[in-house]
Image: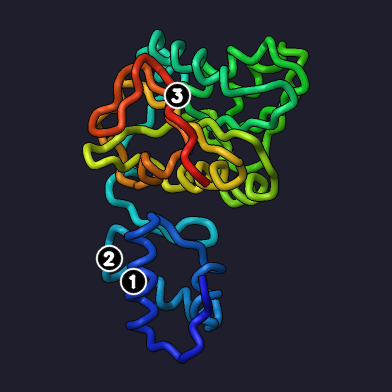
Amino acid sequence: MARSKTKTLPVERERRILEILQERGLVRIHEIHSIFGVSKMTLWRDIQSLMKKHGDIVPLHGGIMLDTGGLNEKEDSIEGRKKLNSDGKTAIAKKAAELIKDGMTVILDASSSSYFLAQELNPFSGLTVVTNCIDIAYSLRKFNGVEVVVPGGHLKKETSSLIGPQTRDFLLGISADLCFFSVSGLSPDGELMDINPMEIEVKRAMIAAAEESVLLLDSTKFGRGRGAYRVMRIDEVSRVVSDRPLPGPKKVRGGRVLPKKPR
């Protein structure tokens, strides 16, 4: 984000902050400080003014986020999600594992689909797995050929995931071959949606750290659009692995991997 070279009025700063919130779901103080160049105390006054005018803006550590209902939407535990379409997720995991080679560094998010993929990694050697999911990390302890790296951060007990600025910053500092991730839903217009903006921030950092992003999308997510927050569009993903044909013009049959997007 480029810093504004001209002095801005409070109403202009509030308008721009609101635009960023509506686009991304959350914003950090240091980010808007870099845009406007005013003191952080001034920015907090702007934010307090915005919060009075908009009841759906809520504070978080080091910033604010827009609560459009996602914070009140219940997130299922990873144990519960593992039971949902387990056959489909197993098929996805086996197909996704074909993309992995010995010696790679791969990132797994805290989704149940990534958990199933982790169970397919025993045959590999020299593999480094970076994950923010405690359950996934623990399940990999028995695989001799896999080195497990877990970032720091705040433990979200419901999803067994590490989130927050510390997690995000760690992920942005690494370089990986592949990032495997999932989402809460695929909307009819091709948007990948999720529930918690802090989880999304971590997913985006994972995707940015990897040479290729691989979406693990089981068919229960089709057309749901579950979640208040946008992660990205499906056509921005490098590859997609699914257990059934995707709705719409892009289709994946029987878990077949889509060709790599041109970089």
Q: Which residue is mark 1?
A: 50
Q: Quadrant of residue 240?
A: top left
Tell me if residue 11 can be seen. Answer: yes
Q: Nearer the viewer, residue 182 or 248?
A: 248
> Which tag is nearer the camera, tag 3 or tag 1?
3
- Name the disc covering residue 165, or none: none
Label 2 packing within 10 angstroms: few (<14), some (14-19), many (20+):
few
Residue under label 3 = 257
- Please state which of the two labelled residues, at mark 3 or mark 2, is closer to the viewer: 3
Residue nearer the viewer, 171 or 190: 190
Query: What residue is at 42 percent from the left and 19 percent from the top?
Result: 256
Callout 3 amino acid: Val
Whether residue 49 is situated above or below residue 232 in the rendered picture:
below
Residue 54 — which label? 2
Residue pictured at 66% horizontal, 38% vertical: 176
Residue type at mark 2? His
Give how far apart the Cα atoms at labels 1 and 2 are.
6 Å
- In contact (CB < 8 Å): disc 1 and disc 2: yes
**Which amino acid does the dot numbered 1 rest on?**
Leu
17 or 106, nearer to the observer: 106
